[in-house]
Image: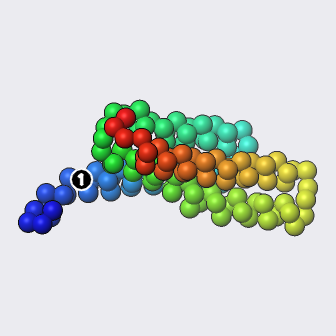
């Protein structure tokens, strides 16, 4: 590592930053859709997000850059969806109503799926080598 010019690492850094940025953009778009749509569309967007996030897992590569897209996707979804889900749950618990129960259920499900997907991605990236 000592004596190697920094310019030698630029392709790796560009691949890492590029994957993260694309994931953040797609995740932000999915998060915005989840925050502003009806339950049927939320289910569709969740399925699209899961498929988009899992796409890089099937690409054979030993590069850590392949995990930057799903991580960016999760971060993009989280920074919009988590505060929105907390607001929905707080509104439901302050004044329970039948219509809010469905929104609260979807908000809880979204938070669970985001947490589970993050944990699985980190564990898979950490412990499965060379897949």
Q: How many marks?
A: 1
Residue occupying image coordinates x 39% and y 51%: 68
Comparing 66 with 22, the one in front is: 66
Q: Position of residue 37 (x, y in %)?
A: 68, 48
Comparing 123 with 29, the one in front is: 123
Comparing 60 with 3, the one in front is: 3
Q: Position of residue 25 (x, y in %)?
A: 45, 53
Q: Position of residue 96 (x, y in %)?
A: 91, 59
Asked whether residue 73 appears in the rendered view, the answer is: no
What's the coloring here?
Answer: rainbow
Residue 100 in which image quadrant: bottom right
Looking at the image, is 123 positioned above or below residue 82?
A: above
For the C terminus, give its image quadrant.
Answer: top left
Residue occupying image coordinates x 74% and y 52%: 108
The answer to whether residue 71 is left or right of residue 101 is left
Comparing 62 with 65, the one in front is: 62
Asked whether residue 24 appears in the rendered view, the answer is: yes
Residue occupying image coordinates x 43% and y 45%: 127
Residue that numbered label 1 is attached to: 12
The answer to whether residue 120 is left or right of residue 90 is left
Q: Position of residue 103 (x, y in %)?
A: 78, 51
Q: Say few, some or many: other residues with alpha carbon within 10 Å of mark 1 (under 14 / 14 to 19 / 20 or more).
A: few
Residue occupying image coordinates x 15% and y 62%: 1
The answer to whether residue 51 is left or right of residue 23 is right
Q: Secondary structure at mark 1?
A: helix
């Amino acid at each position: 590592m000592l004596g190697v010019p920094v310019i030698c690492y630029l392709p790796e850094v560009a691949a890492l930053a590029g994957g993260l940025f694309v994931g953040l953009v797609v995740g932000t778009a999915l998060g915005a859709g989840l925050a502003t749509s009806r339950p049927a569309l939320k289910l569709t967007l969740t399925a699209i997000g899961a498929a988009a996030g899992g796409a890089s897992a099937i690409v054979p590569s030993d590069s850590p850059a392949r995990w930057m897209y799903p991580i960016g996707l999760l971060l993009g979804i989280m920074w919009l969806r988590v505060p929105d889900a907390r607001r929905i749950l707080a509104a439901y618990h302050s004044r329970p109503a039948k219509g809010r129960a469905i929104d609260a259920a979807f908000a809880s499900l979204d938070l669970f799926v985001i947490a589970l997907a993050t944990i699985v991605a980190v564990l898979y990236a950490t412990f499965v080598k060379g897949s």
